Image (cartoon, rainbow, N blue to C red):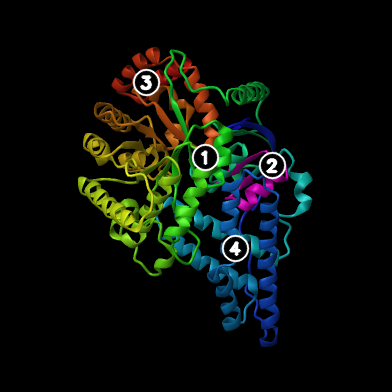
Amino acid sequence: MTLVLHGLGVSPGVVMGRAYILHPGMPEIAERPVAEHEVDAELERLQRALDTAAAQLEAVRAGLPLDAAEVAAFIEMDLLMLRDEVLVHGPAELIRQCRCNAEWALKQQGISLMQMFDAMEDDYIRSRRVDVEQLVRRVQRILLQEPGAADADHHRLLAGRVVVAEELIPGDAILLHQQGAAAFVTAFGGPTSHTAILAHTLGVPAVSGLHHAAALLRNDEPLIVDGAEGVVLASADEITLRHYRRRRRDERRRRAALGAIRDTPAVTRDGVSVDLQANIEFPEDVTVMRRSGATAVGLYRTEFLFMNRPAPPSEEEQFRVFVRVLRALRGAPLTIRTLDLGADKPLPWDGEERLGPNPALGLRAIRLCLKRPELFRPQLRAVLRASAHGPVRLMIPMMTSCQEILQVHALLDEVRAELRAEGHAFDPRLPVGAMIEVPAAALAADLFARHMDFLSIGTNDLIQYTLAADRVDDAVSYLYDPLHPGVLQLIQRTLEAAARAKVPVAMCGEMAGDPRYTRLLLGMGLRAFSVHPCALPEVKHAIRHADIGRVRRLTRRLLRADFPEDMQALLGRINAL
C-alpha cells in the first residue's frame, strides 16, 4: 500500500529515488569525568574538532560555483559561528571548571544556546537556532568519530538518493547536493528557511514540515518526492509510478522551454509589457540576476551588511557596496531597502537590549531606524551619495503611519542639506517609496501613494499580519493563504490607489515569485514583479502565455467568490487559459 505524507513544498520538482535517513537524532552523549592532568588534552581535542568542522565547511565553500554568492554567504555565517567566542570559549570554560569531556561540555553549551533562540519569535532568528544546533551536532560527531554526511565516502551512497533529515544547515545541504543527493525531506522548516532557499537555488526538490518522516520511512526505501505539492510517497503502486514518470518528463521539457525564453521580453499575448525585476541580498547576486533576464533590482536587502559583525558598517563602507552594485548593474535601476532589522532581529552590538513582549509587532524596520538615527542617517547618506553613480530608488520597509512618512522626508531633507554643504554629489530627485506590508498601510494606500514616489507590496509580512499566522510555523502554516479574500482585497486596494495617484507599484514578496498567482495578479492590475532570480523564468513563462483581457474577467469573479473551493476552481481556470 502506498504511504502518502503531506508537508510543505519548499522547492519544486519531482524526484524518484531511495531514502537515505540522515541524522536520526542527536548523538548519545554521556558525561565523563576528566582528571586535572587531562584537561589540556581535552581542550586540544575540542579545538581540533572545531578546526575540522571549519575545514569541512571551507572545502564546501571552495567547491561552489562563482555565481552561488547567496550560498557562500550562508556558509560564511556558519564559519563565523564556529569561531564565535560563545561556541568556542563556553565549552572550554566548562571543561576547565567541571573537568568534563568535550562532548558533554559542547552539549551543555548547545542546550543553553537553543533555549536562548527558542525565546525568540522571528523567522530569521529561529533559522539561526537551527544552524547553531546543526553545527553543535557536526562537532559532536567529529568528537565521537562517527561517520557522517561530511565524509567523502558517502559520495557513492548518496547518488540519486532522497535525504531524509530533521533539519539541514547550509553547509550540509550543499555537501549532500555535491555528493549526489537528489532531493531533501526535512522535519522542520518553512518556505523561507535556509534549506528552502538553498534547495531552490540549487534546483533540488524539497519538502519540509514532515515531523515524523524519519520514523515512518525506512532507509533505502523507494520514495517519490513532489516538491511542488509538498508530497512524499513510499511504496508507490505501478499506476502512481507511471503518473510521476510522466510528470518528470513533462518537467524536463518545461525547464528546457524556460531556458529558451530567458532573453525574450515579458509581454502578454495581448501585448501588455510587464516589468520583471529581481530580489538580491549581496553584490555578487547581480551576476545571477543578469543571467535570469531581470531588467532591474526591485529589492536589495541591506540588513546583511549589518549582520555577523561587532559594529555597524560605516557610511563609507555602505556607500562603497552600493556603488559596487550599481557598477555591476551597468545602468539598470537599483531599489535599496533600508535596514529591516529590529527588536525581533537584535543587532549583535546591542548587547543586552530587551526584546519586546511581541517582537514581530515591536520595534523593527523603519520604527527602529527612526528611533536610532545613528544607524539610519549614515545609511541615508550612503544611498544618496551612491545615487550620483547610477539610478537608485530608496524603499522604506514596514511603513504604517503618516507620521513615519513625515519623519522620513524630514530626515532626508536634513541629509540632503548636509551633503550639499559638504560638496557631495547626489540625485536631488531620488525616488522614495514605501513597502505595503502592514494591513493598515494597505487600507491607507491612497495616503501613501500621495506622499511617496512608488509603492511595493511585501506579501510575506502582509499575509502574515492579515491572517495573524506565522508563515514559518508549520503548526499554523495551513492558515498562510495568499488567496484569502482579505489578502486579495488589500492587494487590490493598493493597486487601485497607486493607479489613481499614477504612482508605480510593484510586488516583491513570495507571492510575486509563485507562478500559480502570476495571471491572477496580472488580472488585478499588477505590472511589475520583483522575484528571486530562480523564480523569474517560471513567472515570465506565465506572463507570456497570459491574455489579460480574458484573465481580468475571471479575476473579477474570483474576487467575488465566497468559498475557497470556488476560488481555487477559478484560479485553475485562469491558469488554464
Residue at 50% in and 65% down: 113
Q: Distance between the residues labelled 1 and 4?
A: 40 Å
Circle on res. 523: 3
Q: Which of marks 1 and 4 is in front?
A: 1
Q: Distance between the residues labelled 4 and 3?
A: 49 Å
Neighbour tally class for label 3: few under 14, some 14-19, many 20 plus, Cα within 10 Å? many
* Residue that numbered label 4 is attached to: 136
Q: How far apart are marks 2 and 1 (CA)?
A: 34 Å
- Above-or-below relation of 176 to 50: above
Q: What residue type is labelled 3?
A: Gly
Q: What residue type is labelled 4?
A: Val
Give the left or right position of residue 200, taking residue 371 as reference. right
Front-most of residues 75 and 575: 75
Of labels 3 and 1, earlier in sequence is 1
* Residue that numbered label 1 is attached to: 329
Q: How many labels does the image show?
A: 4
Q: Position of residue 558 (x, y in %)?
A: 34, 20
Q: Disc 3 on helix, strand or loop?
A: helix
Q: Nearer the viewer, mark 2 or mark 1?
A: 1
Q: Which amino acid does label 2 sit on?
A: Ala
Q: Disc 2 on helix, strand or loop?
A: loop
Quadrant position of the N terminus in the picture = top right
Neighbour tally class for label 4: few under 14, some 14-19, many 20 plus, Cα within 10 Å? many
| Residue 97 position by quadrant | bottom right
Of labels 1 and 4, earlier in sequence is 4
Of labels 4 and 2, earlier in sequence is 4
Residue at 53% in and 36% down: 533
Q: Disc 1 on helix, strand or loop?
A: helix
Circle on res. 181: 2
